[in-house]
Image (cartoon, helix red, strand yellow):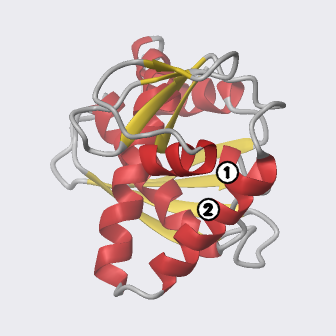
Amino acid sequence: MYLLIPLFTIMVKKRYPLKDREEDIGEKADIWSLNGFGIILVREVDMDRVDEEFLRYWFGGFIKGMENVDEKSQETVLRACGVACAQSYTEQVFQEAKQNSEDLQGFLTQLARRFRGARYESTDEHTISVRYRNCGCDLVINGWVKSPMLCKCSAGNLQRNFEASLGIPVQVKLISSILGGGKECVFEVLLCEEHEQF
């Protein structure tokens, strides 16, 4: 498992100097500074050994900071997070589902099989309803984030997944979310007008 974390968080927490070379921090992980951009790759992390309380505080501070910026900035940052999340796993699952399907209904059925507790339904020729019975975000599951703002990340994730698999532009609208008080997460995916029928 790979986890991207801003470099200063672990460096400050562990009191290590910032370096532009690989640095071994013992059994926890290998760290690389990527040209001083402040991002690290933590390789083969044993999540039981990561300081859960620290991550909860850090992500709490991140969300608090995000709540103090304008909505356009929130959307920009969280959409980029959603794209990165999609590229880490779900985009590939969507592409495989598309490759193994003969039509849109088959594609949506494949997705529902791959993501338990999810429903994908074509409501008309340009609209897909996506419903999740449970939140699938690791940040929420691990208790690091509880803000419904994070659902903007999920919208960006879905947009990337559908665009990468269908090869057309889509728009994703958040209808309701569990973090926002809903019984399930509901998204509406709007396919571009000129899309071809599978």
Residue 37 position, x and y percent, is 26, 44
Quadrant containing the C terminus is: top left
Which labelled disc corresponds to residue 5?
none
Q: Earlier in the sequence, mark 1 or mark 2?
A: 2
Looking at this view, name the residue that lies furthest to the top.
Answer: 100
Marks 1/2 in contact by CB < 8 Å: the verdict is: yes
Looking at this view, name the residue that lies furthest to the left.
Answer: 194
Given the image, on which type of amino acid does mark 2 rest? Phe
The 10 Å Cα crowd at callout 2, few under 14, some 14 to 19, many 20 or more, is some
The CA span between labels 1 and 2 is 9 Å
Q: Image height check: is 197 above or below 138?
A: above
Given the image, on which type of amino acid does mark 1 rest? Leu
Quarter-of-image position of residue 44: top right
Is residue 81 visible in the rendered image? The answer is: yes
Residue 132 position, x and y percent, is 71, 52
Which labelled disc corresponds to residue 139?
1
Quarter-of-image position of residue 2: top right
Q: Residue at x 70, y 64 (%)?
A: 57
Q: Which residue is mark 2?
A: 59
Q: Residue at x 22, y 41 (%)?
A: 168
The 10 Å Cα crowd at callout 1, few under 14, some 14 to 19, many 20 or more, is some
Q: Left or right? Give the position of 154 relative to 138.
A: left
Is residue 137 visible in the rendered image? The answer is: no
